[in-house]
Image (tube, helix red, strand yellow):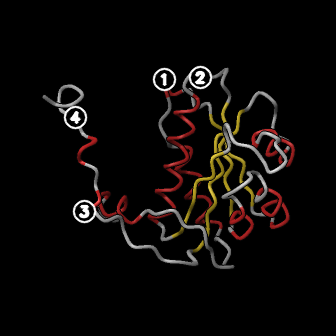
Amino acid sequence: MEQFSELIKKRRSIRKFTSEELTQEEVVNLLKAALMSPSSKRTNPWQFIVVDDKETLAKLAHCKENSSSFIADAALAIVVAADPLDSDVWIEDASIASIMIQLQAEDMGLGSCWVQIRERFTATGMSSDEYVHGILDIPLQLQVLSIIAIGHKGMERKPFNEDHLQWEKIHINKYGGK
């Protein structure tokens, strides 16, 4: 493991993957990160559906009108869902789990990209949540927040440039800081 500050600079959204599969150990490490993610009052409202079947990945690639086609080329997709009845902050808890998966992927030298599902729609106008439910037979009480596409990087991106940090968005003691 490298320094966290270096890890967050290096973690960039990757939408191109090689055809190399993930090892069982890599998948287990990604899932451990998901299961160790914090949640409100340790309710753990999240559920994770792991998809490595190429046919299913190809179907999931149509979960949104735009910006999801790369799922078909990923070695793995982790669908992050949660039960709103388990926690009133399920969105936050599932979001934390999603980024924990992405940080673990980067730490392992893998690429990943978050595909937003909640409040999104397919090209036909169906809700993305309903579409993913139908493909994966997810119980109705679960809400799908995201799909994290993961694979070996088929592209490289430069680390985040700290010169582009928007320090004007930081406020001390009150908004505006004066």
Going from the N terminus, do you reach mark 3 or mark 1 first?
1
Mark 4 or 1: the one toward you: 4
Going from the N terminus, do you reach mark 3 or mark 2 first?
2
**Tag 2: amino acid:** Ser
Going from the N terminus, do you reach mark 4 or mark 3 first?
3
Q: Which mark is residue 87?
A: 2
Residue at 57% x, 32% y is: 91
- Number of on-image labels: 4
Q: Which quadrant of the figure contains the C terminus?
A: top left
**Tag 3: amino acid:** Asp
Going from the N terminus, do you reach mark 2 or mark 1 first?
1
Instruction: Report whether 31 appears left or right of 12.
Output: right
| Residue that mark 1 sits on | 41
Callout 4 secondary element: loop
Callout 2 secondary element: loop
Instruction: Report whether 3 appears left or right of 11.
Output: left
**Tag 1: amino acid:** Lys
